[in-house]
Amino acid sequence: MTKIIINGYKGRMGQALLACVPQHHGIVLAAKIDAGDDLAAAIEQADVVVDFSSHAATVGVATLCAQHHKALVIGTTGQSDTETFEIRKLAQIIPMVWASNFSTGVNTLFWLTRKAAEILGQDFDLEVVEMHHRLKKDAPSGTAKSLVEILADVRKLHLNEAARHGRVGIVGERTPREIGVHSIRGGDVVGDHTVIFANIGERVELTHKASSRDTFANGALRAAHWVVKQKPGIYDMQDVLGLK
Ligand code: NAD
């Protein structure tokens, strides 16, 4: 039995995780934590912490997991460069699955995006569009950032220089060295992502639409079961799904 702690259980993802745990044979809930609760007091009861709280909490959670040699599944997005650096350091001590998106469909989209970018080549303009519910705090979404990372990697572009976040004013003609990123917010949209490959005379669009948070929750629980058996390091959902 893999014993898990859900961090951020009162949130939208936390509630989805709680609802999905009973469907996972081999996983049992050891504790649930939210802001104001004491994770340190509960952590020894678990094998793995599943963190869907806030990017601001994740370094502290990872530090605690490293001190107690517990595995970690990171679902939070929006980490700063400093937070990312700290988390990566702690992954030398414990195994972590860190994924901007835990759904099987989106991980298929990641795979297809790489393939399409490789096949279509340099002549296609690359744009990523994402839409999420009105309460989402970070932009662009972690998933959109992952898609831009994949595109930049295939095109051998520097990530931060290539990403073009929205356009306003007299921005001039589009250059082949930019990847447009556009965030739409509204209503209760769980998460839509489209990658556009546009050339003169034709356009390819790859789209994924999530209509339930259960898809993320079930992926994160599968990752929790998997990560407890791994060596220290950072893994992603492609590792868990065996897509690498
Ligand atoms: P939410 O605001 O509904 O829930 C966050 C919960 O975390 C709240 O209950 C809040 O009280 C709690 N929290 C905040 N700080 C905390 C702390 N220090 N300790 C413990 N609990 C704390 O947000 P959400 O929509 O559930 O999303 C949570 C995170 O997961 C976000 O970063 C979001 O971008 C990310 N997310 C990731 C995926 C994925 O597949 N990786 C999917 C959906 C959302």
Image (spheres, rainbow, N blue to C red):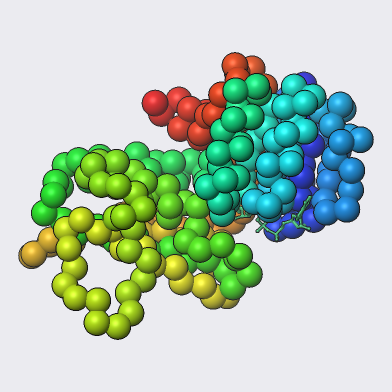
Rendered residue at 89%/48% (across/down): 37
Quadrant hosting residue 224: top right
Q: Is residue 57 visible?
A: yes
Which corner quadrant of the figure contains ligand 1? bottom right
The number of numbered discs placed on residues in the rendered structure image is 0
Q: Is residue 234 above or below residue 212?
A: above
Q: Residue at x 77, y 26 (%)?
A: 67
Q: Position of residue 31 (x, y in %)?
A: 86, 38
Q: Is residue 201 above or below residue 98?
A: below
The image quarter in which residue 82 lies: top right
**Side of 118 where 105 appears, left or right:** right
Residue at coordinates 43% horizontally, 63% vertically from top-left? 130
Foreground of the two, 205 or 143: 143
| Residue 217 image offset from top left, x and y in percent | 64, 45
Q: Residue at x 68, y 52 (%)?
A: 56
- In which quadrant of the rendered view does residue 90 lie? top right
Q: Position of residue 2 (x, y in %)?
A: 75, 24
Q: Which residue is most to the left?
A: 201
User: On the rendered image, what quadrant is the C terminus found in?
Assistant: top left
172 above or below 112? below
